[in-house]
């Protein structure tokens, strides 16, 4: 039998899951290429795989941008919104136990990776 809690931890345990989820949650994911430029240390392949996995898991939903046929935007699903609330609680826990400063609550994880 597989432990679903351990299995679920793999969703947010991947290096780029939380930064991508947060960028989408805060409306800062303004396109694939812009995200690559802003974060610098993620490869196009890794970002593509991460987006596909989060979409496959039902955490995000891909949408075509209304102003451009070639640009895709993403939104958190109901499942993704709930997961994002858990991520915020993890950040609060880290602040409470002095692992990070309160600035962590104001920034996305992608911003801290710069």
Image: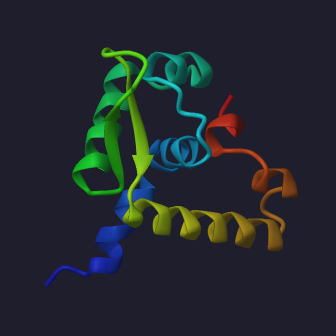
| Location of residue 35 in the rendering, given as x and y in whole percent from the top left corner | 52, 24
Quadrant (top left/top right/bottom left/bottom right) for the C terminus: top right
| Location of residue 14 in the rendering, given as x and y in whole percent from the top left corner | 41, 50
Height in image: 4 above or below 14? below
Locate residue 47 relative to residue 103 in the image: left or right.
left
Which of the pair 50/60 is nearer the observer? 60
Locate residue 49 relative to residue 22 in the image: left or right.
left
Q: How is the image coloured?
A: rainbow
Residue displayed at 43% across by 46% down: 75
Which of the pair 5/87 is nearer the observer? 87
Height in image: 105 above or below 1? above
* Quadrant hosting residue 68: top left
**Which residue lies most toward the bottom here?**
1
Residue displayed at 81% across by 73% down: 96
Which of the pair 32/104 is nearer the observer? 32
Locate residue 102 relative to residue 39 in the image: left or right.
right
| Location of residue 89 in the rendering, given as x and y in whole percent from the top left corner | 65, 71
Quadrant (top left/top right/bottom left/bottom right) for the N terminus: bottom left
């Amino acid at each position: 039998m597989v432990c679903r809690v351990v299995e679920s931890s793999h969703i947010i345990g991947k290096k780029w899951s939380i930064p991508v989820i947060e960028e989408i949650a805060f409306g800062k994911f303004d396109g694939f290429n812009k995200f690559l430029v802003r974060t610098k240390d993620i490869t196009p392949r890794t970002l593509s795989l991460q987006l596909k996995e989060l979409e496959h898991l039902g955490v995000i939903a891909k949408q075509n941008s209304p102003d451009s046929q070639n640009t895709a935007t993403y939104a958190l699903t109901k499942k993704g919104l709930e997961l994002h609330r858990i991520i915020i609680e993890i950040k609060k826990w880290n602040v409470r136990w002095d692992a990070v400063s309160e600035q962590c609550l104001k920034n996305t994880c992608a911003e801290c990776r710069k």
